[in-house]
Image (tube, helix red, strand yellow):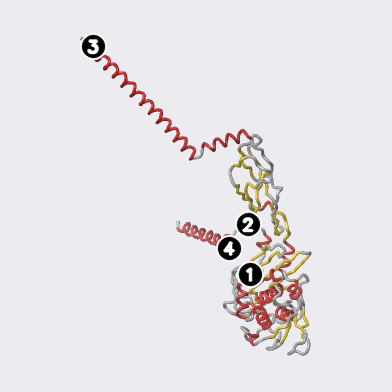
Amino acid sequence: MKKLRVFSILLTLTLLTGLLSPYAAASGSGSAILDGMQVQAKAAILVDADYDEVLYEQNAHEKMYPASITKVMTCLLTLEAVDRGELTLEQVVTASSALHTGIGEGASTADIKEGEQLRIIDLLYAALIPSGNEACNVLAEAVSGSVTEFVARMNARAAELGMTGTHFSNTHGYHDDDHYTTAYDIYRMCRQAMEFETFRTIVSAKNYTMPATNFHPEERIVRSTNALISNFRVAGYIYEYATGIKTGHTPEAGYCLAASATKDGHTLLSVVMGCEREPGTTGSEGFLYFDETTRLLEWGFRNFSRRTILDDTALDIAEVEVTLSEQANYVAVRPEGSIVACLPNDLDAEDFTRSWTLDAESVEAPVEEGQVLGSITVSLNGKEYGSLPLVALNSVSRSELLYRLDRIQKFFDQLWVKLVLLAVLVLIVVLVLRRLFTRGGRGGGRRGGYAYSGASRYSGRRRR
């Protein structure tokens, strides 16, 4: 008996452990391709940039430190100011004493000096290619007049872009506990910046030659920190399809990389954050954020394809009852349009769940072909992929006789009509009753009075 009790306890614990384990608690994505992917990073995201569709995410909405990926927002705001005509790329600005605001020791630099005069385009390259922190402060003053005002604009723009997990404290990403974002928010920021041709040109460049200035009498070459594009800093990570975007690293943030790649006309954008360097490696070895980014991008190109989940060929959805027609009692509905998504190659349209809602249980004729009668949504394991209106497959005509009879019935079904009819009926009854009682009372009085007075008058005369 005691052995049986121990066995029962062990069995219960085993079942509970299974239920509480992450693998048992989640039903999975429905795709072995998705479920088998794991990135060696604290957070990651992969997005189909052409259609703004998330293909993979790992802690993508968790708070992280962005380090120098911050510079994407600084350059985005600068390019937007240029686009509005507030600045030009050839405009020359002077670095002020605010040059090193918020920058501590060991920060990356483009060797810009206080009082140095540089063009906006050169400052953009200096910020994005060698990751010059001071270049960002110079751009901030050029755009907003002060670094403080510019940082406020950064946060306002982040809110506009839907970066709900982001707060900026400086222009460059030097560590500050109150300076944070998420992998998803970085994607939103980078996708917006990549709309600018100038930005795309800069972040895909291996190097850039900055012209001589009043503090640098000779040209200087700045080189990319992105090893997917350039071998200058670390070698062995070149990815032939890479088109950008920005690296970032601080002890608190770890190694971070926002990257984009285009292959066969298809563009993906990835973000990895909080990567570590492989222990014991030296030189160019062990930079996992480059390896993991390449692996993530290649995984996306290899395992996903754009396919139709639902379109107007689906004719077996539902039927809606039709009233006031002698032609048909029901009309079938079909989706209007199509839902197309970039899906793992091991998923089919049949794997998705369809759920629909009809606007009403029945509809009055006439029904026009294409008339909206409801909506349909497709989803898979809790993730919604889109919705379409449900429209009538064909037209249904109205019977005029049934229509007029229905209008008459509906007229008399109205409360005020019923009340009026009731009032009229009551009035009729009252009048009838009153007439009956009135006629009865008058007739009886005349007959009794006439007989009595007549008899009295004539009998008296006879006696005389």
Residue flagged by tag 3: what amino acid is it? Answer: Arg
Question: According to the image, label 2 marks what residue?
Answer: 384
| Cα separation between marks 2 and 3 | 115 Å
- Compare residues 184 and 59 and report the one nearer the observer: 184
Residue 278 visible at all: no
Question: According to the image, label 3 marks what residue?
Answer: 461
Q: Mark 2: which secondary structure? A: strand
- Compare residues 40 and 19 and report the one nearer the observer: 40
| Cα separation between marks 3 and 4 | 127 Å
Question: According to the image, label 4 marks what residue?
Answer: 22
Classed neighbour count for the residue bearing mark 1: other residues with Cα under 10 Å, few (<14), some (14–19), many (≥20): many
Classed neighbour count for the residue bearing mark 4: other residues with Cα under 10 Å, few (<14), some (14–19), many (≥20): few
Q: Mark 4: which secondary structure? A: helix
Mark drawn on residue 185: 1
- Compare residues 397 and 225 and report the one nearer the observer: 397
- Compare residues 438 and 200 and report the one nearer the observer: 438
Of pointers 1 and 3, the one earlier in the residue sequence: 1
Mark drawn on residue 96: none
Point out the image quarter for the C terminus: top left
